[in-house]
Image (spheres, rainbow, N blue to C red):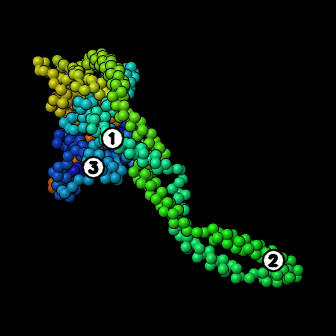
Amino acid sequence: MLIELHIKNLALIKKADIYFKEGLSVLSGETGAGKSILIDSINLALGAKASKDIIRTGENEGFVELIFTLDEKRKEKLKNLDISFEDDLLIITRKISNSRSVCRINDETVTLAKLREITDTLIDIHGQHEHQSLLSAGNNLVLLDSFCPEELITLKKSLSKNYGELKTINQKIQGGSDERLRKREIDILNFEISEIKTADIKINEEEELEQIFKKSKNISKINDVLSNMLEDLENESIGNNIREVSEIAALDEEIETISSNLNTIEDLISETIHYTNRYLDSLEYNEKEYDRVIERLDTIRHIKSKYSNDYKKIGELLKEKEKRLEFLKDFEGEVRILKESASRLEESILKECTKISEIRKNVAITLTKRIKEELEDLNFLGVEFEIKFTRKDKISRDGYDAVEFLISTNPGQPLKSLQMVASGGELSRIMLALKSVFANNDDIQTLIFDEIDSGISGKTAVKVGEKLSNISKGHQVLCISHLPQIAVMADQNLFISKSTDGKTTQTNIDLLDKDGKIREIARLIGGNNLTEVVLKTAREMIQEADSRR
């Protein structure tokens, strides 16, 4: 979830450090105080297009930083995206200047595309902004499937397996259908199989040959060094010294050790001379053997460079090529067998797709009813909602269904795709209704609702506050609102204000304590005239809201 937001030199904000909690956080304040700047700043950190105008007047650059805590699912996703992190924290920063924009994740510079890919799993903003996963047409099917019974998961796994097998079979058939290309591949395979078999590389053969090559190449040096050593050993007379020391050993027991060591040295020298003479007698240069070793090493290295450095993999590759050659040589017979398998798979796939579609359509009836009830509860009177099914031209691993969420918010108007809804406030309430239904199935941790209270009041506002509170039990929810019915439901209230020194204007964000929340609710009820009656009403609203949360 989002735990910290730091902003510097963006629009009216000189410096702001905001710390968020779990549950529902409501941001409120006077009109024009800069509430939208917070959403714009978060959007910038998430990868939205940056305008130079957003930099605070008189400054050279602006900065925004988001800090998230990560659960196990999020950490696994980030690992798959090659993002490193420590202490279960993810820090996203974006610095904007007149010349460029730099995005970093945990101090590692990333592209905007990579940034968006990562943040799509962390936060969802609902309002007149870009990050709206529920508005993605491609996500409608995922959401619908999340409501379906376990039977659907089993069917989709089987469908995916059969789909993969069918794809492999079709690739095999397609791969040998061109007779000219097939004959050419047969020739290549025959050559490569013969080349690998003729090479007949043994394990450790290359290492052994390299040793022979090194000895043959340096035989002259070996002979010279050993001959010189032998001459020195033979000319060195240590016998007289040994006899003389042996004679005086009786004079002192400690000399016995010296005498014993000298006798050992004499034996080693004698043995070394004998062994060296034998080695030099056997040492000879064989040109044919030398040429054979070089030729063999060239063969081995050619095979390794062409096929694999791993001898085991070369053997596996040989078997694959032999199997492929056998298939191509008897292509007609093999294709008949493959087509029979493909036909059986296609039949199974179609049955599975039909069953999957039936399950989805049955669930869609219940889901449509629930979503419509939520919309009506949010004062969408006469609303119509429909989950539209169309059949795709091609079957995929998800089946043959294409799913679209359609809505009409006013009686008499035709149903349109959710993507066609233009009003920010209306759109936010629609998203709230959908989130209320999909709350337990949604994978996004942090939800932000902007302009959700546009055009509502009274009981509808109360319902909106209750739904936000309910969603916040499983998600972190941030909401910008000017309605007391929503603000009273908050676990954390933040007040946004604007101040000026006559030369510059500054937006301030303050965390409200218990008394501050009462005064802010009172301000939302009665404006800046905080009478005791208004303050009492605010206290009663907060008390009543606490009983409903």
Residue highlighted by disc 3: 111
Q: Residue at x 46, y 59 (%)?
A: 295
Q: Residues within 10 Å of mark 2 (few under 14, many from 20)?
A: many
Residue at 62% across, 76% down: 227
Which corner quadrant of the image does residue 403 belong to? top left
**Distance in Å between CA atoms under marks 3 and 1:** 42 Å
* Residue 511 figure quarter: top left
Camera-nearest residue between 283 and 137? 283
- Label 1 SS: helix
Q: Earlier in the sequence, mark 3 or mark 1?
A: 3
Query: How far apart are the two marked residues, 3 and 2, measured between alpha carbons?
Result: 79 Å
Where 98 falls versus 358 (above or below)? below
N-terminal-most mark, 1 or 2:
1
Give the x, y percent position of residue 437.
Answer: 30, 24
Whether pointer 3 and pointer 1 mark residues with C-beta atoms closer than 8 Å, the reply is no
Question: Mark 2 belongs to which amino acid?
Answer: Ser
Mark 3 falls on what kind of element? Answer: loop
Q: Is residue 421 above or below residue 184?
A: above
The crowd level at tag 1 (other Cα within 10 Å; few <14, some 14-19, many 20+) is: some
Tell us which disc is closer to us: 3 or 1: 1
Residue 407 image position (x, y, % from top left): 18, 23
Q: Is residue 462 visible?
A: no
Which label sits in the foreground, 3 or 2?
A: 2
Q: Residue at x 62, y 79 (%)?
A: 228
Residue 412 visible, this orientation = yes
Dot 3 or dot 2, earlier in sequence: 3
The answer to whether residue 235 is left or right of residue 43 is: right
Q: Where does label 1 land, which residue? A: 185
> Which residue in the rendered view is the most extreme toward the front?
288
Q: Amino acid at mark 3?
A: Thr
- Residue at the extreme right of the image, as rendered: 250
Q: Which residue is mark 2?
A: 259
